[in-house]
Image (cartoon, grey):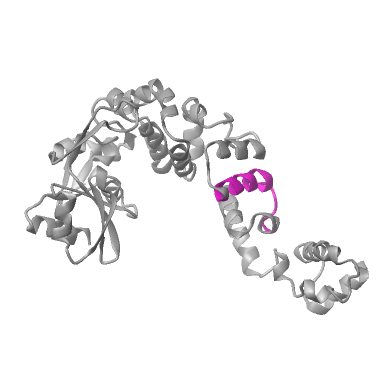
Amino acid sequence: MYREVIKRFNAAGYQAYLVGGSVRDMIMGREIFDYDICTSSLPKEVYKVFSEEKIFETGIKHGTVTLLYKDIPFEITVFRKETGYSDHRHPDKVIFGATLEDDLVRRDFTINAICYDGEKYIDRHGGIQDIENRIIRAVGDPEKRFSEDALRILRGLRFASVLGFEIEPETLAAMERHAFDINTVSAERIFTEFKKAAAGNHFTKVYEKYYDIFKLFIPLAAPVKSVFKNAQDAVNALQTLKADKKSVKLAKDYFTYYNCKPIEMLKNCGKENALYICAKRGIAKELEAVISEGTPYTVSMLAINGNDLLPLVEDKTRIHEILNTLLDEVMSKKMQNKREILLQKVVDIL
């Protein structure tokens, strides 16, 4: 599909290349989720080339629009170069109409500075070799790259965690020297990168190896595999980073119920969080077996409900308590989840 987009640009007289993470993942044989295209075409000209398609101004001030082509989103950005990063985060000036080389040299790491014209790769900075050697290396002068944008430090850690690559020594040294500039990055962006890094298969190794950097931007981070010392530290840290409520709950569940049985995780954490925790423990199949056998793990899965108890229970405030008692009995296999059996148990309790 991306070849069709590139050909449309070329037919209109513009250069266009697939670029960045999509090319990196293509070379590595990984699934591609995001398609980024750099082009000599200005955003206003994209509208002319794809006049019959839907186009959204998702980053127009940065020269970016999103093209929806055959229901697939393509982020289209004009060749650009950037000058001045006085806040260690954003360029003071973005110049459109630059060359392909200008566009590639401004990127963070060599593995993200490869482009593809639909037939061949264009690799001006040795990114393909670094992919083969499983190395994360800054484009050009690493001092300049991290001085320009401190977020690149977090991105480097994320790529190391997700891809399992080593960080090249000079690149790492520059990351360490500029680590304190991370305080110029918003809490929300820090959390976004940390969340992506934490989801990587190599996170534990990367966290332990680069702990001295992590501890500068993750409040209450501990030099242990669990990252945080306890559930409350995890919650406090994520709230400081302005994490969303869903992520905060996952962290709390992770530290509170990590060592519980799968069925207990389902009851206390919910299916989604239980699956995540069990996957981290390497017992996802055990959880799937529990789910497939249909054992109730929520009150709503019982063969009776609160309405069934109304005629039996004098103190209505006890209904929730009784239902949970029944759930515990069923979960522990002490009792079958059958209506008549559950109702008899209620009578016995009362």
x 83%, y 73%: residue:
309
x 25%, y 25%: residue:
141
x 37%, y 30%: residue:
150
Image coordinates of residue 298 in percent, x first then y, are: 70, 64
Residue extending furthest bottom?
A: 340
The stretch in magenta equals: 246-263
Image coordinates of residue 277 in percent, x first then y, are: 59, 50
Q: Between residues 43 and 201, which one lies in front from this camera angle?
A: 43
Report the magenta stretch's main SS: helix
- Verify whether residue 256 appears in magenta: yes
Q: Is 65 drawn above or below residue 165 in the view shown?
A: below
Image coordinates of residue 348 in percent, x first then y, are: 92, 70
Q: Please state, as top left, top right, bottom left or bottom right, where the C terminus lies in the image.
A: bottom right
| 7 left or right of 191 in image | left
- Verify whether residue 259 appears in magenta: yes
Image coordinates of residue 232 in percent, x first then y, are: 66, 38
Q: Please state, as top left, top right, bottom left or bottom right, where the N terminus lies in the image.
A: bottom left
Q: Is residue 283 visible?
A: no
